[in-house]
Amino acid sequence: MLTVNSYSATSATEPLAPARVERRDVGPRDVLIEIKYCGICHSDIHFVRGEWGTAPYPVAPGHEIAGIVAAVGPEVTQYAVGDRVGVGCMVDSCGECSSCRKGEEQYCLKGNTLTYGSTDKDGRITQGGYSTHIVVTEDFVVRIPEGIELDSAAPLLCAGITTYSPLRRWGAGPGKKVAVVGLGGLGHMAVKLAHALGAEVTVLSQSLKKREDGLRLGADHYYATSDPETFEQLAGSFDLIVNTISAKIDLDAYLSLLAVDGTMVNVGAPAEPLAFNVFPLIMSRRSFAGSAIGGIRETQEMLDFCAQHHLGAEIEVISADKINEAYERVLASDVRYRFVIDISTLA
Ligand code: NAP
Ligand code: ZN
């Protein structure tokens, strides 16, 4: 067993602080990864603050992991020491249910093992990427292609795949009008990816403060949702809306922006229930859907797509002692557009 440095939460209210976490011995099919960078996802904040239910403290969050393979078990076939690799939100699943057989481990019917805060097969609570090393079965490791820097690749492991998966499933591409709601970590990747897929992209943000950035990232149009005229002007216009907002919103207002047969996909995961009126759905055969990350195969596909299109996340690299400050800035929508921890500052 390996004991390594981390930044961990000890309760829902205390700031995160340095702590040691344990990693299992490298098993026959395991990969030991020296973590170089880890993104800060808003989910980390929801989770450690107990917004989705009580968290199992102490816990090191972090599921946007980019690093280098430091050791492999004797039966590992896909990775070798020195490879550039990533780990996202899952580290295991049953491997046998219909979802896993389809490569959709995120919908494992027996419940997958999340990168942090889950009970692992050995009974221990998983610990995430705000740490120097992690041991993961090779089936849940992906390859980071040359051409994407490790720091800007890290956020692709959650923000990238969580937006790529619904954009692909609901056919974002040429001739499709896609709206991205919220220009944060997920939102900025949704803009880049939807643009690269060939869709006409509109950002719906609370204000016009980030308009220039949005257009530079690939949006064709940019509107402020604080302006009631936005909702009148854009009524009935989108084939697909991807909602990345981490808080409760007035869903009826957004559903009215969908065209006939349009779909609004919620990836934002606020703690509070969201309510809506069914009439905007009925009257234009609209759909309201949810989507969770993506499978391992699709995550690799997304990384290869990003390399091909020269896409990475826009990041602000911070040292580990700035994690709590970064959390406050994420909560204030003051992130451009993902904080990434330089894990060498944890060594
Ligand atoms: P983030 O960086 O904080 O971005 C969220 C954005 O939502 C903000 O930048 C802001 O955009 C907007 N926003 C925040 N509070 C708002 C409010 N009260 N009213 C209106 N707009 C508001 O967060 P993230 O890391 O992208 O994550 C977003 C959400 O997705 C979180 O709930 C997270 O847990 C969830 N998530 C889900 C999955 C999944 O698998 N479904 C995966 C990862 C994350 P503007 O400033 O542009 O308005
Ligand atoms: Zn995440």
Image: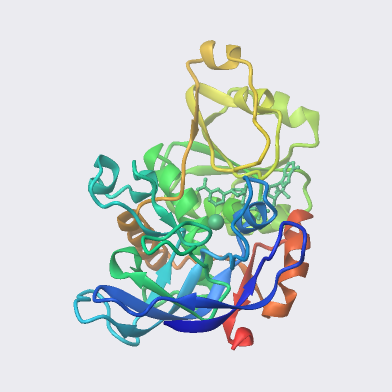
263 lies left or right of 111: right
Q: Residue at x 52, y 67 (%)?
A: 128
Residue 99: quadrant of the picture: top left
Above or below — where is 310 with respect to 290? below
Q: Residue furthest front?
A: 123
Q: Residue at x 59, y 46 (%)?
A: 220
Is any atom of residue 143 visible in this view? no
Q: Residue at x 45, y 68 (%)?
A: 310
Identify the colour scheme used. rainbow
Above or below — where is 320 with respect to 200? below
- Residue 338 screen position, x and y as percent: 63, 64
Quick check: which quadrant has ligand 2?
bottom right
111 lies left or right of 343: left
212 lies left or right of 83: right
Residue 275: quadrant of the picture: top right
Total label count? 0
Work out whether residue 113 or residue 43 is closer to the camera in this orientation and state it: 113
